[in-house]
Image (tube, helix red, strand yellow):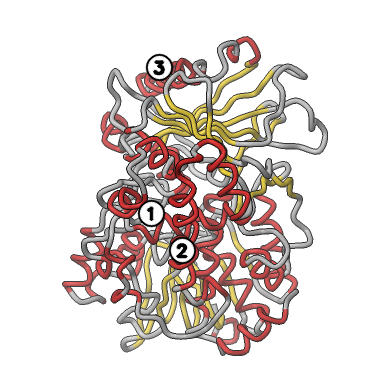
Amino acid sequence: MSEQTKYDVVIIGGGIGGLASACILAKEGKRVIVLEKNHQIGGNLQVFSRDKVVFDTGVHYIGALSEGQNLDRFFKYLGIREGLQLKQMEVNGADRIHFGEESVSYPIGQGYDNFAAQLIAHFPEEEKAVKHYCKLIKEVCSAFPLYNLKYESADYFTAEFFTRNLKDVISELTDNKRLRSVLVGNSLLYAGQSSLTPFYVHALVVDGYINSAYRCINGSSQIAKLLIKEIRKHGGEVRKRAEVSSASYLDQHIESVTLTTGEKIYGDFFINSTHPKAMLSIFGTNRFRKPYVSRIMGLKNTQSSFSVHLKFKPNSFPYLNHNFYHHKSEEEAWEAVGVIDENWPRTLMFSMTTSEENPIFAEAASIITYMDFEEMKPWLNSFNTVTIPGERPASYYAFKNKCENKVLDELEKLFPDIRLHIESVYSSTPLTYKDYIGDPSGSMYGVQKEYTNPMSTMIDPRTKIPNLLLTGQSINLHGVLGVTVSAFATCFHLIDPNDIMKKLTQIK
């Protein structure tokens, strides 16, 4: 590639972090290209189709998208909000928290006043605790400027909430063990480990869904498609099946990256939106200080997952406009445990897909539970994607089938006749997520944040390579909102942040 075709910014990885970064930079006049190794672009926004039904792989609902809320404004700046096809979930309970084989479930309402009212109806003696919890979540979220569309410095590490774990903070709110477990009942959203997960992670994740909750009609891949459209509209490029294998240097700066095909892509700046460990293998551990390499390689990932995807018989199972978070006991809500034993699955989320064609009955649903990556040891050498087809051993499919049935057995505690309505079943293991998302252990949310040493698990977008920046779910926070915020934070090192913040604050 000649010098005349050099890009201002080359972005490795086409997940939402890479796509949002490319969209921001392209809108601000930069010549950008996104390089994605897979056939489908979008990372956790990817969907797959079976029997003419679309299934989401990673994003099952989105928060903070009502008029004027933070993700609504970010998406409007990116130019994708108007094109999204969304369905707002049940206002009085977008999530329902359930334990054991009880008949009652606890609603997680939208809007803070409504959220409090719904819980107080179940826990009238805990009104003070519920309202204090709401106040605490708001206080924590207000300490993150960019999350609140502000550009100013913030010393997170001196804040008490940054160095306190989820269990301690929630336990101080109330002595009511059931209320405590309800408040962390949707911890699958961040793979919570109660004695390890910082409270701020819980606060930032649940705040968005308390504000509002939406499902994507016909799949979350529409977000990726709209971002790609905007990138190309502003002169940017997006390439799939373009896997980056290495980098070349001129002095201390990256000059180009090389694809597995041998093609070189030149740029002035480079943004890595893959997992930090994958970043080291691309750009070379010798280019970073040994303590940095040791820190990155020593980072723990969040728990992996196992997903079961159901296609229902036509007009058979009623569509439910909320999610069920089911736990075998109160204690199971607190820990992301994925070891396969007689008690697995200990917790699961049941979420339906929504379509314009069939709003009364559910076409499909997904069930997500935890699974240790260690369970994949017998098949670690296998690989299978659309781009690089492969065949896994028969034992792998037998294992999947066994796990599918265990998950459905647990789901029948919520819906005793559900098997009668199922037409077909598909499943995804930690290996599926490893191969498609590129995370080394197929983790749900990248790097595990730890309250005991928050600085070690917060990764600066800047690196010691002068023209290499980082973004993605492992850098600041995961989820559609968290990664979008991280993309803006990364791009602020290349464009005028004050100008962007002015544009964001002017959006209605």
**CA–CA distance in space, label 3 to label 2:** 34 Å
Please state if 99 lies on the left or on the right of 62 as rendered. Answer: left
Q: Do the numbered discs 1 and 2 sit on residues whose CB atoms are within 8 Å? A: yes
Residue 385 picture location, percent across and down: 49, 40
Kindly identify the amino acid type of the residue bearing the numbered disc 2: Gly
**Number of residues whose C-alpha sits closer than 10 Å to that of mark 3, classed few (under 14), some (14–19) or many (20 or more):** few
Label 2 sits on a secondary structure element that is loop
What label does residue 402 carry, if any? 3
Kindly identify the amino acid type of the residue bearing the numbered disc 1: Gly
Task: Give the residue furthest to the front.
Answer: 125
Is 319 in front, or is 162?
162
- Residue labelled with disc 2: 472
**CA–CA distance in space, label 1 to label 2:** 9 Å
Q: Which callout, 3 or 2, points at the residue further toward the start of the chain?
A: 3
Label 3 sits on a secondary structure element that is helix
**CA–CA distance in space, label 3 to label 1:** 27 Å
Is residue 268 visible from the viewing direction of this image? no
- Residue labelled with disc 1: 446
Residue at 38% from the left image edge and 72% from the top image edge: 247
Please state if 24 lies on the left or on the right of 300 as rendered. Answer: right
